[in-house]
Amino acid sequence: MITTAEANGDDTTNLESELATAQGETENLRTAKTTAKDALAPVLLAQGLDDMYAREGEEFIAWENYNAVVTELEARREAYAEAEQELPDVEEVYYTAQYELDFANSREEWEAASEAFAAAEARFNAVNDRLNESQNRIGELEGEEGDLETIYNDSVTAREEQAQKLKDEANVDVPAYDAREGPPTLPEEEETDDSTAGGSETPEPSTEEAV
């Protein structure tokens, strides 16, 4: 536009002034945008690290829940196996005691057989109760195990994605985290230098004597 005006012999002083002003304003906007971006970067990084801590916390809770079920399931299976191993001997004692009670020939034999049968029956019932309780609980835990494992695996994926996001957007490598080793640690905050925090320094006491 200015070139055309000059070719036509027109006064281009105002146009040049307006162009210079527009260019200055554009440069000011660019500077302000860069300054704002630089000021925002630490805030976004802090938020990203907070999000990372949250993802690690979720993974730890998911692992604790999953591991608790796996641990109990293992213990219940062991208890069931022990009771199952005990059962044949317990059954033999129980049915023998029942037979001797049924065919006692005297009051003395019946009293002795009755006492033996009561003890055998108590043990027989206890072993069967352990079997039934363990079996029922195993069924419940097996139903929970798969869901909790999925939640744990999903939480691992979410934590890894957040770590990659920090790498891509802030070029920050966060330490590898494994929930099996314990809970996460809080993100480290930058230390504030008191000397640059502003404010006046405490004056040294005067050594001059008052006149």
Image: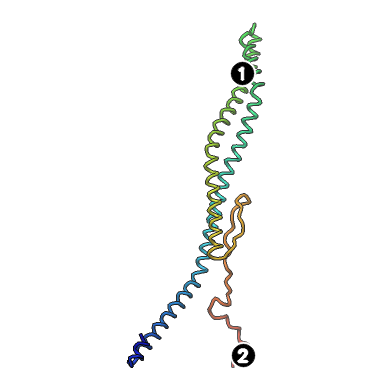
Residue 23 vs residue 77, the one in the foreground: 23
Give the residue type that dot 1 points to.
Ala
> Within 10 angstroms of label 1, few (less than 14), some, or many (20 or more) residues?
some
* Residue on which the image places disc 1: 118
Would you place residue 141 above or below residue 111 in this image? below
Q: Residue at x 52, y 68 (%)?
A: 42
Q: Is residue 186 above or below residue 73?
A: below
Q: CA distance from mark 2 to mark 1?
A: 104 Å
| Quadrant in the picture for residue 132 | top right
Q: Quadrant of residue 159?
A: bottom right
SS for callout 2: loop
Q: Residue under circle 2?
A: 209
**Disc 1 secondary structure class:** helix
Which mark is first along the chain, 1 or 2?
Answer: 1
The percent position of residue 153, horizontal first and vertical second, equals 55, 48
The picture places residue 49, in percent across and down from the top left corner, at: 54, 61
Label 2 neighbourhood size at 10 Å, few (<14), some (14-19), many (20+)? few
Classify the position of the N terminus by image quarter.
Answer: bottom left
In what quadrant of the picture does the C terminus appear? bottom right
Q: Is residue 31 left or right of residue 194?
A: left
